[in-house]
Image: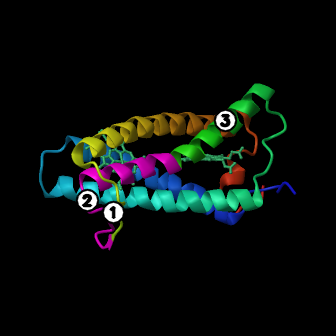
Amino acid sequence: MTPRHYAPSQKVLHWAVAALIVALVPIALAMANLPDGDLKNALYEWHKSFGLTVLALALARLLVRAARGAPPLVASLPAWQGRAAHASHLALYALIVVVPMLGWAGTSACCAPVMLYFTLPLTLPISGGMPVGEAILRVHQVAAFALVALVVLHAAAALHHHLVRRDGTLRRMLPGRAE
Ligand code: HEM
Ligand code: HEM
């Protein structure tokens, strides 16, 4: 049966993934542009650990979504906007899995070990060394910027619903509200 609202777990996972992405993109831009040193190295570690956390939470989100579904879009939406919303949600789900997987694979190939929060070794067995790692990380970067662009559009659409259309779209993703 189609649910009438998002489950609390879906809301928590949505905002946890959003917060991590908002943190790890500026970290990525800083780490890529800083001169070599301890700060740059630390930012790489935080970027990788936050990214792996996004991957774990994204997989949890997909499981909850598959098990429970999502409420239908607000009824007043024109058909093309409904199709755009569904397509962008699908693309967001795909990218929050694919982007960290590419980062993980590329880093495992070029720059092992991958350590989760400075402790747990999680290097993938990917051979090919630096050339393969760099090629994968280039795709990671392009896919990450596509994700950022889509998130900006998505957040703008959510704010448009809330401030201009004044429907319940944003409210139903907020904690503590049933609709
Ligand atoms: C949703 C998750 C992720 C997002 C949104 C993301 C985003 C980005 C972005 C925007 C850059 C480009 C920075 C620049 O060159 O200006 C980048 C670079 C990088 N990312 Fe990620 N990333 C994620 C997950 C990961 C993971 C899980 C790893 C590794 C375990 C990783 C490893 C790297 C590395 C090593 C670079 C630097 C590549 C280079 O120096 O050219 N990322 N990431
Ligand atoms: C930063 C990373 C973000 C990602 C990856 C993301 C991803 C998603 C996905 C995949 C859905 C569809 C949920 C489903 O149908 O199961 C969704 C729904 C939603 N998101 Fe985000 N989101 C992000 C940030 C934001 C931000 C910043 C806002 C608000 C400013 C926002 C507001 C919403 C709202 C209101 C919905 C519900 C839409 C509806 O059900 O009609 N999201 N998000």
Q: Is residue 99 visible?
A: yes
Name the front one of labels 3 and 2.
Answer: 2
Image height of 164 relative to 144, above or below: above
Q: Earlier in the sequence, mark 3 or mark 2?
A: 3
Alpha carbon separation for disc pair 1 and 3: 33 Å
Q: Amino acid at mark 3?
A: Ala
Task: Specify the quadrant that holds the N terminus.
Answer: bottom right
Mark sitting on residue 123: 1
Identify the element where label 2 is drawn.
Answer: loop
Pointers 1 and 3 in contact (C-beta within 8 Å): no
Q: Earlier in the sequence, mark 1 or mark 3?
A: 3
The quarter of the displayed image where residue 132 is located: top left
Residue drawn at point x = 36 percent, y = 66 percent? 122
Pointers 3 and 2 in contact (C-beta within 8 Å): no
**Circle 2 crowding by C-alpha within 10 Å: few under 14, some 14–19, many from 20:** some
The quarter of the displayed image where residue 157 is located: top right
**Circle 1 crowding by C-alpha within 10 Å: few under 14, some 14–19, many from 20:** some
Pointers 1 and 2 in contact (C-beta within 8 Å): yes
Image height of 66 relative to 79, above or below: below
**Which of the two residues, 113 or 87, is positioned nearer the viewer here?**
113
Name the front one of labels 1 and 3.
Answer: 1
Mark sitting on residue 112: 2
Identify the element where label 1 is drawn.
Answer: loop
Q: Amino acid at mark 1?
A: Thr
Find disc 3 in the rendering and name its residue: 87
**Which of the two residues, 77 or 176, is positioned nearer the viewer here?**
77
Q: Going by the picture, which residue comes out furthest to the bottom? A: 119
Q: Which residues are magenta?
A: 97-120
Q: Amino acid at mark 2?
A: Ala
Colour option used:
rainbow
Is 162 left, or right, of 44 in this rendering? right
